[in-house]
Amino acid sequence: MNKSIRLKLHPSEFQYNILVTDEEPFTSLAIKIRSLSYSNLILVTNTVVWKFYGSLIDSSFKRNGLTYSTVILPDGEKHKNIKTLQRIYDKMLLFKADRGSILIGLGGGVIGDMTGLAASTYMRGIRYIQVPTTLLAQVDAAIGGKTAVDYALMKNIVGAFYQPIFVYSNVNLLKTLSDRIYRAGMAEVIKYGIIKDRNLFLYIGKNSNDILSRSPKSLLSLISASSRIKAEFVEKDEKETSGIRVLLNFGHTFGHALESFTHYKILHGEAVGIGMIIAANLSYLLNLCEKEVPEKIERLVRAIKLPVSSNNLDMRYLSKSINYDKKSKADKINLILLKEIGMPVVYRMDKKMLKKILREVKI
Ligand SMILES: NC(=O)c1ccc[n+]([C@@H]2O[C@H](COP(=O)([O-])OP(=O)(O)OC[C@H]3O[C@@H](n4cnc5c(N)ncnc54)[C@H](O)[C@@H]3O)[C@@H](O)[C@H]2O)c1
């Protein structure tokens, strides 16, 4: 089955499709590429993803008469840097890439972000296609055109907003993910339920077993619902200027602090899961929501087998890390908190007060 979501940007009117499918991988990707005109096709991936899917994509492309070159990068966030970006440019020059070339980013968020940045800068911008292969990338990173590399120990500090020409999300590609990486991606899906879609939140609770066993039917529902929500946010606030897209950061202020507090031993999604529980508890302590809101969120995070706390989590140290968050200005901080499941609010708060209240959060 295929589900297609259209993302339409204002005022440029540029639009593209996000195809979510459970078909045999790469069939409609190859057919869609065949219908485009281009000078050459360059697939950017990493060693891990290529090992799993190299022969499948190769046979699918060849069956459809597509010829292409490959750039196979080393795996991991530590390679999301300018040096690796240069490797992409070097290969593109070698392959004589020009304005008519198309890049395809096949991989998780790291590959997608770097492919997008290479496409946005090479000859002042060429087309690219996102083929996300992690749950996090399918529901989040591949949609919305944020591209970047890390630099000088800062994450995503060099980048651009640059949209792909389409996104191809095949749920069958998620079968080879480790349980830990798969579940970490679920934190972002739960987040969409919390900030925008109560029904999605309830669906995850009711279908947690199917979701944990990665049934294609449940994945198709989750990924298409999440893609629709992400697309809606991007349509309303493409470049994060009006403050709408910032709601997508629910759980992330505390999540980022937790990542640095644990020296990145915890995965981003795991940190976001705990960060959402902290944000919901804080919302309760500030009388913004009922006690059942943080309770429901914690139950759902637990049902997906994500951690609900971190060893030796000390809120005093956690609040120290929060001062470095990019959303923090002077002595005040903007937090995304909750009135209800599906009703987030931007709450401006004094940092001293936050530190005091955080001590009361028990998780
Ligand atoms: N652009 C955005 O809007 C946005 C949003 C969120 C996150 N991000 C970025 O995304 C990155 C994190 O993305 P991620 O969690 O996908 O990490 P990742 O890209 O590092 O992938 C995680 C691991 O899974 C492996 N992998 C990928 N697909 C696989 C598959 N199908 N089977 C088996 N293994 C597979 C990868 O090789 C890697 O080892 C971060 O750099 C983050 O900054 C970007």
Image (cartoon, grey):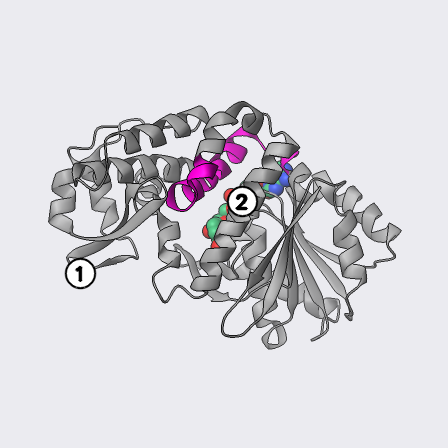
- As rendered, which of 128 and 69 lies closer to the eye? 128
- The reply to whether residue 52 is visible in this rendering is yes
- Tell me the residue at 83%/59% (across/down): 67
Mark 1 / mark 2, whichever is N-terminal: 2
- Tell me the residue at 75%/71% (across/down): 96
Question: Is residue 90 covered in magenta?
Answer: no
Q: Residues within 10 Å of mark 1 (few under 14, many from 20)?
A: few
- The reply to whether residue 76 is visible in this rendering is no
**Hey, what amino acid is under mark 2?**
Ala
Q: Which residue is mark 1?
A: 330
Q: State the count of labels.
A: 2
- Does the Cβ of the disc 2 residue fall within 8 Å of ligand 1? no
Q: Residues within 10 Å of mark 2 (few under 14, many from 20)?
A: many
Which label sits on residue 225?
Answer: 2
Q: Quadrant of residue 104?
A: bottom right
- Does the Cβ of the disc 1 residue fall within 8 Å of ligand 1? no
Q: CA distance from mark 1 to mark 2?
A: 37 Å
Image location of residue 179, percent across then percent down: 55, 29
- Tell me the residue at 49%/36% (across/down): 186
Q: Quadrant of residue 214?
A: top right
Question: Is residue 186 covered in magenta?
Answer: yes
Quadrant of the snapshot with the C terminus: top left
In this rendering, position of residue 39 left or right of residue 292: right
Image location of residue 236, percent across then percent down: 44, 63
Query: Does 210 sit above or below residue 190?
Result: above
Magenta segment boundaries in residue numbering: 174-201
Secondary element under disc 1, as helix, strand or loop, is loop
Query: Does 289 sit above or below residue 161?
Result: above
**Hey, what amino acid is under mark 1?**
Ala
Image location of residue 9, percent across then percent down: 52, 67
In this view, the mark in front (1 or 2):
2
- Tell me the residue at 50%/39% (across/down): 185
